[in-house]
């Protein structure tokens, strides 16, 4: 009986971990970003957002990348950095301009979008993201929203 209870508990724990994270399909993220108000936000097209996300996280809400250079970590689908934008409880001198935990950026797409909106309101805008500058800037990005049924 104890072994069965342990297995059930372990199974529920694994299910909980799996449900928290999500790797979106391209058109699903397109529709979600549009619904959450990113289409045209600060003059940035939906295609630019989707391109950014593809190259930052591969559409994975649980993505994490550690930066040895400054001891910060980037979190979630937008790869929002703990040095300036969120609090992970371990980055020295975190500014936390989005006033949120970094974990929330992985578990709550609304929070991640709200923080991304905060980031692009700064003077650097979408150029804050190196992956966008390298892979998306000055390119035809129509393919990122094509066939997804959004205008």
Image (spheres, rainbow, N blue to C red):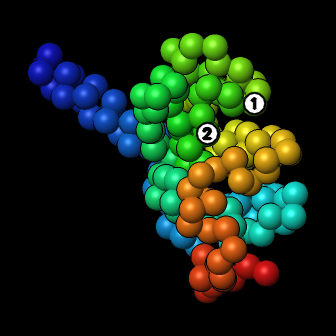
Q: Provide residue 50's location: percent of width, then percent of height.
A: 62, 65
Query: Badge 2: few (under 14), some or many (20 or more) residues near its Cα, within 10 Å?
Result: many
In the picture, the quarter occupied by the N terminus is top left
Q: Provide residue 42's location: percent of width, then percent of height.
A: 87, 57
Kindly report the distance in space between the C-alpha atoms of the residues bearing marks 2 and 1.
Answer: 10 Å
Location of residue 12 by image quarter: top left
Residue found 71% across the figure and 23% down from its top: 96
Residue under circle 2? 80
Residue found 28% across the figure and 25% down from its top: 9
**17 left or right of 135 in image:** left
As helix, strand or loop, the secondary structure at mark 2 comes to strand
Residue in the foreground of this view, choosing between 6 and 47: 47
As helix, strand or loop, the secondary structure at mark 1 comes to loop
Residue found 59% across the figure and 82% down from its top: 143
**91 left or right of 137 in image:** left
Q: Provide residue 40's location: percent of width, then percent of height.
A: 84, 66
Q: Which comes sooner in the sequence, label 2 or label 1?
A: 2
Q: Provide residue 32's location: percent of width, then percent of height.
A: 68, 61
């Amino acid at each position: 009986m104890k072994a069965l209870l342990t297995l059930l508990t372990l199974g529920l724990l694994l299910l909980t971990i799996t449900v928290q994270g999500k790797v979106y399909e391209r058109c699903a993220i397109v529709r979600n970003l549009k619904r959450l108000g990113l289409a045209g936000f600060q003059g940035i097209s939906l295609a630019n957002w989707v391109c950014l996300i593809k190259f930052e996280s591969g559409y994975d809400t649980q993505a994490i990348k550690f930066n040895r250079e400054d001891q910060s970590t980037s979190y979630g689908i937008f790869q929002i950095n703990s040095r300036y934008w969120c609090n992970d409880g371990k980055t020295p001198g975190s500014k936390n301009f989005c006033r949120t935990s970094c974990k929330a950026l992985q578990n709550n797409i609304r929070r991640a979008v709200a923080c991304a909106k905060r980031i692009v309101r700064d003077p650097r805008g979408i150029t804050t993201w190196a992956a966008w500058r390298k892979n998306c800037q000055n390119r035809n990005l129509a393919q990122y929203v094509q066939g997804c049924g959004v205008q």
